[in-house]
Amino acid sequence: MKLSIIIPAYNEERTIIELLNKVVAAPLPDYIRKEIIVVDDSSADSTGDLVAIFQQQNPDLDVNYIKHTVNQGKGAALHTGIRLATGNWLIIQDADLEYDPNEYGLLLQPLLDGKADVVYGSRFIGNHPHRVLYFWHSVGNKILTLLSNIFTDLNLTDMESCYKVFKTSLIQAIDLQEKRFGFEPEVTAKLAHIPNIRIYEVGISYYGRTYAEGKKIGWRDGFRAIYAILKYNLFVSNTVKQAIKQSVWPTLTPD
């Protein structure tokens, strides 16, 4: 059995090696191995060189590196990684150390138990550590989650969370379009269109970083998220919804 770990990276030379070491060390059941896919979205720093050194120093690890020739956005990097994944399950892992790979087992458990098709990690539930940072960012996240929930009829607490785990066959069957930070509301809306899909949420820790430390998301991305929520919930035709159902339904079978 295999877990594909998709790492979108853009100018992450300060954290990429530490993150890769944490991913490799993250505990999983003995029967699950890791496939690591780093998608470099045309970094201008030494991110790629550092990943290459890591690969050379760890030839026995399953680490794949792909670089976009032009910067396209986080969503585009995820599209590339999702397309190349070969694992039974797929998790998204940011390269900035805000999320802890030691929690992979926690996130995977509902899938391993056969109870879930998708698991969201929530920064707003549970008793895990959370760095105290920007008030308005947390307000914005909660507003976006509420707006998404209104249209999807889900009761998520953290739609914008990076940590999402999917059955790989499921996420690969969904036609994803958003190339930047609109990925989160788009994938949530399209999952909600699938009848009888089982979505779970588990509490995770969060070690947020400041803009001085390299945080990239901004207020424009918040407006794009609102646009994506409306676009993929209100303005999706029944034909498109049926296509999503037909493409995804065969993947919702027991592993």
Image (cartoon, grey):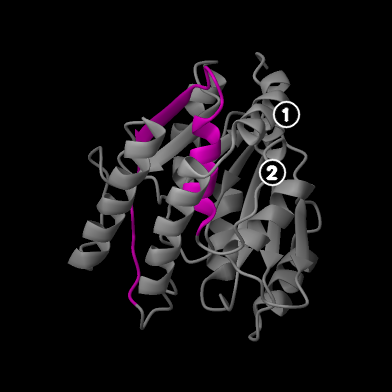
Query: Quick one: label 2, few (<14), some, or many (20+) residues within 10 Å?
Result: some
The verdict on residue 248 being magenta is: no
Label 2 secondary element: loop
**Where's the C terminus, which quadrant?**
top right
Taking the image as shown, residue 200 lies to the left or right of residue 187, namely left
Report the amino acid beneath label 2.
Asp
- Check if residue 190 falls in the magenta segment: yes
* Side of 219 relative to 232 (left or right): left
Pointers 1 and 2 in contact (C-beta within 8 Å): yes
Between residue 214 and residue 240, name the one nearer to us: 240
Report x, y in % for residue 25. 56, 49
Of callouts 1 and 2, the N-terminal one: 2
Q: Image quarter for residue 224?
A: bottom left
Name the disc covering residue 175, or none: 2
- Mark 1 crowd level (few <14, some 14–19, many ≥20, 10 Å Cα): some
Residue depicted at 67% across the width and 76% down the height: 71
Is 230 on the left or on the right of 209, as rendered? right
> Which numbered marker is on residue 239?
none
Using the image, determine if residue 94 lies above or below residue 186.
below
Q: What amino acid is at disc 1? A: Ser
Residue 194: % across, % down: 56, 26
Q: Secondary structure at mark 1?
A: helix
Q: Which residues are magenta?
A: 182-210
Q: Which quarter shows the N terminus?
A: top right
Residue plotted at (28% across, 44% down)? 146
Viewer-proximal residue, 145 or 47? 145
Q: CA distance from mark 1 to mark 2?
A: 9 Å
- Picture coordinates of residue 246, whole percent (x, y): 71, 24
Disc 1: which residue: 247
